[in-house]
């Protein structure tokens, strides 16, 4: 069994808080290419996949001090 383990991708949504520069569409295209070109049986996304995705600091209980 071939497992593709991806971690700490920090995919951003294009706002000013993003850090990686990789957008969701680009990630999905790259992942599809990997799965099509290599014998991958399972894909695991392990932590920190999204980077402040849709986080609004004016909402919720966010402490930035």
Image (cartoon, rainbow, N blue to C red):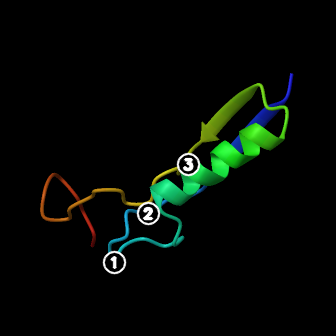
Question: Circle 1 — which element?
Answer: loop
Residue 11 position within the rendered picture, expressed as x and y whole percent measured from the top left: 50, 59
Helix, strand or loop at label 2? It is: loop
> First in sequence: mark 2 or mark 3?
2
Residue picked out by circle 3: 28
Q: Do residues under tags 1 and 2 come within 8 Å of each other at their CB atoms?
A: no
Q: Could you classify mark 2 by the number of other residues whose Cα lies within 10 Å: few (under 14), some (14-19), or many (20 or more)?
A: many
Residue with the mark numbered 2: 12
Ranked by sequence position, the earlier of labels 3 and 1 is 1
Residue 16, image quadrant: bottom left
Is residue 56 positioned above or below 44 on the image? below
**Label 3 crowd bin: few (<14), some (14–19), many (20+), radius 10 Å:** few
**Residue 9 x, y percent position in the rendering:** 59, 56
Mark 2–mark 3 Cα distance, whole angstroms, equals 13 Å
Residue 23 in the image, given as x and y percentages of width and height: 47, 62
Query: What residue appears at the point 52 percent right and 50 percent down from the top-left corner?
Result: 49
For residue 30, side relative to residue 23 (left or right): right
Query: If the image is split into quadrants, where does the C terminus sit?
Result: bottom left
11 on left or right of 42? left
Q: Is residue 8 above or below residue 45?
A: below
Tag nearer the camera, 2 or 3: 3
Identify the residue at the far bottom of this view.
16
Q: Secondary structure at mark 3?
A: helix
Decide: few, some or many residues near mark 1? Use Cα within 10 Å; few <14, some 14-19, many ≥20.
few
Q: Is residue 22 above or below residue 35?
A: below
- Tell me if I can see residue 10 in this picture: no
Quadrant (top left/top right/bottom left/bottom right) for the N terminus: top right
Q: Is residue 64 above or below residue 45?
A: below
Picture residue at 27% right of the left edge, 58% below the top:
55
Instruction: Residue under label 1, please give it.
Output: 16
């Amino acid at each position: 069994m071939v497992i593709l383990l991806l971690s700490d991708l920090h995919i951003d949504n294009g706002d000013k808080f993003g850090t990686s520069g990789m957008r969701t569409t680009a990630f999905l295209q790259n992942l599809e290419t990997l799965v099509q070109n290599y014998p991958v049986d399972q894909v695991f996304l392990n932590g920190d996949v999204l980077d402040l995705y849709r986080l609004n600091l004016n909402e919720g209980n966010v402490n930035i001090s």
